[in-house]
């Protein structure tokens, strides 16, 4: 089964639920699953998707917050988003509990850590979207999930939450990866500031600052350090028009070899 994965956006949960209902109805859950994420963007809730792509427990990414003078307004912003039901540009909140775990952690742990003069908060499961702060980060598969082999195609055109998706697949050895590493620009949180013309309200430029590290399942900082693919296949001027066909050829060769090894 081949999926062209475009991102981790507001329709992810509904789209994945439709996919799983279709796969169960058509008896496809034991088939090999190939996920082409070479054209994917970022977003959130990648763990929700992976829980349905594998039959094995896995460790998710972690994240922390750099403690500075933006933390208090940042917490105020997150509190307002949670009360409103989600960020205004997303339409849904990026966790399975509406942000309750996140807000409790921000108010009960991050703010006290700032007051204590620490440089970073502790690392917790990424944005507390699926697990509590004291969790070890291990997530179990959903009751209905694919059980066949998993192959993923990645490339440098995307990053952010795609970086986390790729790192979770690679670091937990959940599947075979082909292509090129993702962009490697994932962080946990951002803070934006608009610089204005001195003495006026006229905006000049908006800066987005990284205010937290993403920690890969293997314990390494992700930013600038994307997970490496198992089979490197660079996209070049010579192979551009046939690139996806080449990726599929590599995937079929891997799956055929895996099946052959299983018969021995």
Image (cartoon, rainbow, N blue to C red):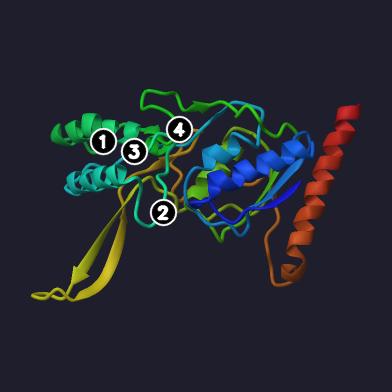
Q: Residue drawn at (63%, 53%), measured in percent from left and top?
A: 5
Q: Position of residue 231 (x, y in %)?
A: 71, 48
Separation of residues labelled 4 and 3 (CA atoms): 16 Å
Mark 3: which secondary structure? loop
Q: Position of residue 26 (x, y in %)?
A: 79, 40
Q: Earlier in the sequence, mark 2 or mark 4?
A: 2
Neighbours of disc 2 within 10 Å: few (<14), some (14-19), many (20+): few
Mark 1: which secondary structure? helix
User: Quadrant location of the C terminus?
Assistant: top right
| Residue sitting nearer the eye, 156 or 79 | 79
Q: Which residue is mark 2?
A: 90
Mark 1 or mark 3, whichever is nearer to me: 1
The answer to which image quadrant residue 33 occupies is top right
Q: Earlier in the sequence, mark 4 or mark 3?
A: 3
> Relative to residue 156, is residue 107 drawn left or right?
left
Q: Residue drawn at (24%, 75%), measured in percent from left and top?
A: 204
Q: Earlier in the sequence, mark 3 or mark 2?
A: 3
Separation of residues labelled 3 and 2 (CA atoms): 22 Å
Q: Which residue is mark 1?
A: 106
Q: Earlier in the sequence, mark 1 or mark 2?
A: 2
> Relative to residue 75, is residue 51 drawn left or right?
right
Residue furthest right as drawn = 264
Q: Which residue is mark 4?
A: 130
Separation of residues labelled 1 and 4 (CA atoms): 16 Å
How many badges with numbers are in the image?
4
Mark 2: which secondary structure? loop
Separation of residues labelled 2 and 4 (CA atoms): 18 Å
| Residue sitting nearer the eye, 250 or 85 | 85
Q: Which residue is mark 3?
A: 64
Question: Where 62 sits versus 3, above or below?
Answer: above
Question: Where 194 sits versus 165, above or below?
Answer: below
Mark 2 or mark 4, whichever is nearer to me: 2
């Amino acid at each position: 089964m081949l999926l062209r994965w475009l991102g981790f956006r507001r329709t992810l949960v509904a789209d994945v639920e439709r996919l799983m209902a279709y796969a169960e109805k058509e008896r496809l859950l034991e088939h090999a699953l190939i996920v082409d994420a070479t054209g994917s963007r970022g977003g959130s809730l990648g763990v929700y998707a992976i829980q349905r792509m594998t039959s094995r427990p896995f460790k998710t990414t972690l994240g922390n917050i750099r403690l500075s003078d933006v933390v208090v307004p940042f917490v105020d912003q997150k509190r307002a988003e949670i009360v409103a039901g989600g960020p205004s540009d997303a339409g849904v909140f990026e966790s399975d509990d509406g942000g309750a775990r996140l807000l409790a952690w921000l108010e009960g742990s991050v703010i006290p850590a700032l007051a204590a003069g620490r440089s970073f908060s502790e690392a917790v499961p990424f944005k507390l979207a699926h697990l509590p702060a004291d969790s070890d980060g291990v997530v179990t598969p959903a009751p209905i999930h694919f059980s066949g082999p998993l192959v993923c195609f990645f490339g440098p055109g995307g990053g952010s939450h795609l970086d986390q998706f790729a790192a979770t697949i690679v670091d937990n050895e959940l599947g075979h990866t082909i292509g090129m590493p993702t962009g490697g620009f994932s962080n946990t949180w951002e803070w934006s500031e608009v610089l204005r013309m001195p003495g006026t309200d006229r905006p000049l430029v908006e800066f987005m600052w990284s205010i937290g590290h993403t920690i890969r399942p293997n314990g390494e900082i992700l930013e600038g350090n994307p997970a490496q693919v198992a089979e490197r296949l660079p996209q070049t001027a010579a192979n551009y028009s046939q690139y996806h066909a080449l990726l599929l050829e590599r995937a079929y060769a891997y799956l055929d070899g895996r099946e052959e090894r299983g018969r021995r």
